[in-house]
Image (cartoon, helix red, strand yellow):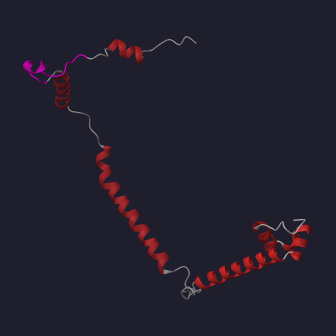
Amino acid sequence: MKDKSNHLNEDEILFSLVEEPDLPEEIKSHLLACLVCQEKKKALMTELERLGKMARDFTPLPQQKPALPFRESRHFIFNRSVLAAGFSVVVIIACLWSLRSFTGSSKHITPGLSPEMEVDLYLMDDILGESALPEYYLDIAAPTYSYFDEEFLDFVVPLGEESNSV
């Protein structure tokens, strides 16, 4: 910038448009003396003004939002919306209370299993414990033995009480 062949770049010209008082003295003096840099600055300024005009042209006109007139209620305590909300809360509570009272009575009285039902329950356990397939189908079915016997499972996941060695 010390000699006239070294012109300002675009960033320096933009900086001169935005922050002209904060420019270093050598850039100010170069900008005042160099006609090429002045032309670049004017061209950039007109381009920015044209861009601003286009932005104004394409921006929609502000429209006033519709506003409803607000009337103050004379009876603050007896407002309709407050009464409707209170009534609906009372109705909901009454419905929930009636449902609880009618369905809750059967939950409180839970008798134990009758002896016949206990026998049936144990019988079902015995039936499910045995294989339901006939003997000649057991040869076709998957084998009942597994690779993980009780000893292996106890080794992996010990369930018994162990003494704490710590």
Q: Quadrant of the C terminus?
A: top right
115 vs 29, nearest the viewer = 29
User: Residue 76 sits in which quadrant?
Assistant: bottom right
Per the image, is 139 magenta?
Answer: yes
Residue 145 in the image: state x and y as whole percent: 23, 16
Residue 159 visible in the shown view:
no
Please indicate whether residue 125 sits to the left or right of residue 6 in the image.
left
Q: Which residues are magenta?
A: 132-145
Q: Main secondary structure of the magenta part?
A: loop
Please indicate whether residue 7 sits to the left or right of residue 119 in the image.
right
Residue 100 in the image: state x and y as whole percent: 35, 54
* Residue at horizontal 12 percent and vertical 21 percent from the top: 140
- Residue at the extreme front: 5
5 vs 13, nearest the viewer = 5
Residue 30 visible in the shown view:
yes
Q: State whether residue 109 is above or below residue 4.
A: above
